[in-house]
Image (cartoon, rainbow, N blue to C red):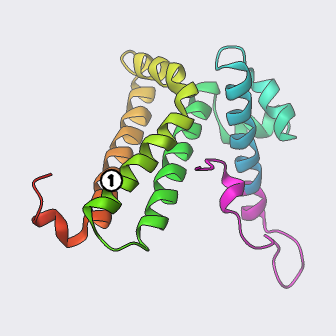
Amino acid sequence: MLDIRQGARSTGTGLTPSTGRRTQSERKAASRQAILDAALDAFNQNGYHATTMADIADAAGVSKGLLHYHFQNKETLMLAVEEQISRRIFETITDTASQLQPSLKNAIWALDELWQGVGEASHLVPVVVELAARSLTNADTRERFGAISDMQVQMLVEGIERVLGPLQEQTDI
């Protein structure tokens, strides 16, 4: 089963060797990740509309000011959550698939894993549909949503190329 939360891939202590303290950059990344994880949990539990930015800040253990430093509004936060989910699904699959020999069987396995990962995030489909609808009237949302869609297509193409390898020229897929 795929784990789409950041913590599933964390390694290391996050501390600088010389001082035993995290750098400002590391603290910034950690607070941003805590917000993304809290938002994902809140959207899962309460849905997009019932979740407030204050709920997310409380769950992440950060101030509302820090939350708004990282994310202008709930919409930009949801777009970031969607982007992270997409990246985690594809990274998990491609990390595993890169260790396999190229074959049609392994390509089918990777597609099954991708579909399973998408299924695990299916509770967010109403939010994604809402963001797609908003992108019709909001230029900023359209740009971000389009960039995420383009990224998803690119990762899918790269994943297929990795899993099929030289077989892609021999198959009619």
Reply yes or no: does residue 131 show up in magenta.
no
Label 1: how many Cα within 10 Å (few below 14, some 14–19, many 20+): some
For the residue labelled by badge 1, is the local secondary structure a helix, a strand or a loop? Answer: helix
Residue at the spot 75% in from the left edge and 20% down from the top edge = 52
Q: Residue furthest bottom?
A: 18
**Which portion, as a residue range, is magenta?**
1-29
Give the vertical position of 22 relative to 141 (above or below).
Answer: below
Does residue 126 appear anywhere in the picture? yes
Residue at the spot 46% in from the left edge and 58% down from the top edge = 93
The percent position of residue 140, horizontal first and vertical second, equals 44, 29
Residue at the spot 36% in from the left edge and 35% down from the top edge = 146
- For this view, does 155 lie left or right of residue 104? right
Residue 27: image quadrant is: bottom right
Residue at the spot 25% in from the left edge and 60% down from the top edge = 104
Give the vertical position of 83 relative to 10 (above or below).
Answer: above
Asked whether 167 or 25 is in front, the reply is 167
Give the vertical position of 113 relative to 143 (above or below).
Answer: below
**Disc 1 target residue:** 108
- For this view, does 64 lie left or right of residue 48? right
The percent position of residue 156, horizontal first and vertical second, equals 33, 51
The percent position of residue 113, horizontal first and vertical second, equals 45, 49
Give the vertical position of 17 relative to 113 (above or below).
Answer: below
Reply yes or no: does residue 10 show up in magenta.
yes
Asked whether 88 or 132 is in front, the reply is 88
Q: Indicate the amino acid at tag 1.
A: Ile
Secondary structure that dominates the magenta span: loop
Asked whether 149 or 29 is in front, the reply is 149
The percent position of residue 94, horizontal first and vertical second, equals 43, 62
